């Protein structure tokens, strides 16, 4: 839903949580079936023992993740009458990761391909569905070209030893496929093409990998240890948001023979800026956004990977507006709530 509320930020990149690994081979029927159940772990004999978190992606081994994104956006606009607008979207991506090498500093380069995508969206009661591999009509291919371009086009990522996404590389095949489908898009100038490439990298791909690679401390930790990651300041409407991702070791447990660190996630946000603005004669008065996020990460210490994560984010926005009109001052009010749930599963 394209509205003033959607310029807030994509908080869905933040945190994490729960569930049980699926060991059966994926079929067309179950590959998009998100598992929301919790992982059944048991306490270790010494829950306070120190340990280290480390990513260990083995060369020659293939890792498959399912990333599910459940989003909803509700808006209410009140002027002379009241208008409601509702949007909901469920997206599922199947990612295949093939580690290439790990250098002396622990940086991992991984070849990646998105093998399948399924999108279900509802806009004010009307449904749209996209599933990769099923689109035959050329008009539909153009309509869903951003997804069609992603499918089965390999690219690479570089991850630091602490889980920082250093670089998303070699996405030229994705961009070229997009232009192959969208013949008219080839008329873009070089600046527009650079923006398109950045949108693929930071708008679609990076949010997926943030669910698989969380930044971790490079020293020994234990139960109740905490750490935080400061995000780049973000402009949201008239406000500036300064956000910290905060992580805490909730417990150390076991899953069969593997030790599992269960990590809670939350955020701290400082909001600053003038809440009033005037644009083309319309005066706006913004309330500070109310932003919450929480989640849980299951980090398999034995295998060196996140096996499941879940993040819940919610943003509430509100503003009033006044504009002169021939009949006097016209007043309006707008509310919006955006919710996102990200679930990452190692399959």
Image (cartoon, rainbow, N blue to C red):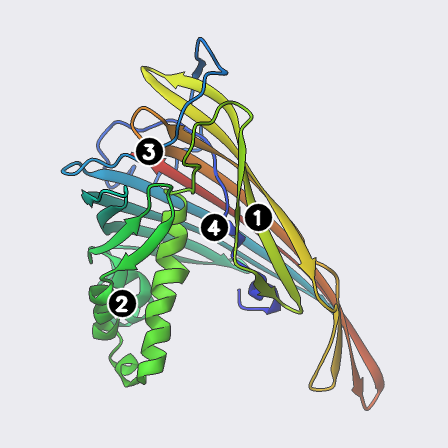
Q: Position of residue 176 (x, y in %)?
A: 21, 71
Residue 244 tag number: 1
Please name which of the two marks, 3 or 1, marks the residue nearer to the observer.
1
CA distance for labels 4 and 3? 18 Å
Label whose residue precedes the other's in the sequence (4 or 1): 4
Q: Secondary structure at mark 1?
A: strand
CA distance for labels 4 and 1? 12 Å
CA distance for labels 3 and 2? 35 Å
Residue visible at 29% across and 45% down? 94
Q: Is residue 294 left or right of residue 328?
A: left
Residue visible at 31% across and 52% down? 117
Label whose residue precedes the other's in the sequence (2 or 1): 2
Please name which of the two marks, 4 or 1, marks the residue nearer to the observer.
1
Label whose residue precedes the other's in the sequence (3 or 2): 2
Q: Position of residue 258 (x, y in %)?
A: 33, 19
CB atoms of marks 3 and 1 within 8 Å: no
Q: Position of residue 345 (x, y in %)?
A: 36, 36
Q: Secondary structure at mark 4?
A: helix
Q: Is residue 26 at least partly visible in the picture?
A: yes
Q: Secondary structure at mark 2?
A: helix
Q: Residue furthest top?
A: 45
Q: Secondary structure at mark 3?
A: strand
Please name which of the two marks, 4 or 2, marks the residue nearer to the observer.
4
Q: What residue is pinned by disc 4?
A: 13
Residue 305 tag number: 3
Q: What residue is pinned by disc 2?
A: 141
Q: Position of residue 49 (x, y in %)?
A: 46, 16
């Amino acid at each position: 839903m394209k509205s003033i509320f959607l310029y807030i930020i994509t908080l869905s990149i933040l945190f994490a949580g729960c569930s049980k690994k699926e060991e059966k081979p994926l079929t067309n029927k179950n590959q998009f079936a998100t598992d929301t159940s919790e992982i059944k772990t048991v306490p270790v004999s010494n829950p306070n023992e120190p340990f280290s978190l480390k990513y260990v992606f083995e060369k020659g081994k293939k890792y498959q993740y399912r990333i599910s994104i459940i989003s909803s956006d509700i808006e209410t606009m009140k002027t002379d009458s009241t208008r409601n607008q509702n949007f909901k979207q469920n997206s599922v991506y199947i990612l295949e990761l093939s580690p290439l090498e790990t250098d002396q500093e622990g940086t991992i380069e991984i070849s990646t391909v998105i093998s399948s995508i399924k999108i279900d969206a509802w806009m004010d009661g009307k449904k749209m569905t996209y599933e990769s591999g099923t689109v035959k009509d050329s008009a539909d291919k153009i309509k869903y070209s951003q997804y069609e371009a992603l499918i089965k086009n390999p690219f690479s990522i570089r991850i630091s030893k602490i889980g920082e996404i250093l670089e998303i590389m070699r996405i030229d095949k994705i961009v070229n496929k997009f232009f192959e489908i969208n013949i008219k898009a080839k008329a873009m100038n070089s600046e527009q093409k650079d923006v398109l490439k950045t949108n693929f990298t930071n708008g679609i791909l990076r949010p997926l990998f943030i669910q698989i690679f969380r930044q971790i401390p490079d020293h020994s930790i234990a139960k109740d240890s905490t750490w935080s990651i400061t995000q780049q300041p973000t402009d949201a409407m008239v406000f500036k948001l300064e956000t910290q991702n905060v992580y805490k070791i909730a417990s150390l447990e076991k899953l069969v023979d593997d030790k599992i660190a269960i990590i809670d996630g939350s955020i701290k946000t400082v909001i600053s800026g003038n809440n009033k603005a005037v644009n083309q004669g319309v005066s706006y008065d913004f309330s500070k956004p109310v932003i919450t996020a929480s989640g849980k990460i299951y980090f398999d210490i034995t295998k060196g990977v996140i096996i499941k994560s879940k993040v819940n984010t919610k943003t509430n926005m509100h503003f009033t507006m006044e504009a002169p009109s021939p009949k006097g001052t016209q007043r309006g009010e707008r509310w919006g709530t955006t919710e996102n749930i990200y679930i990452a599963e190692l399959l």
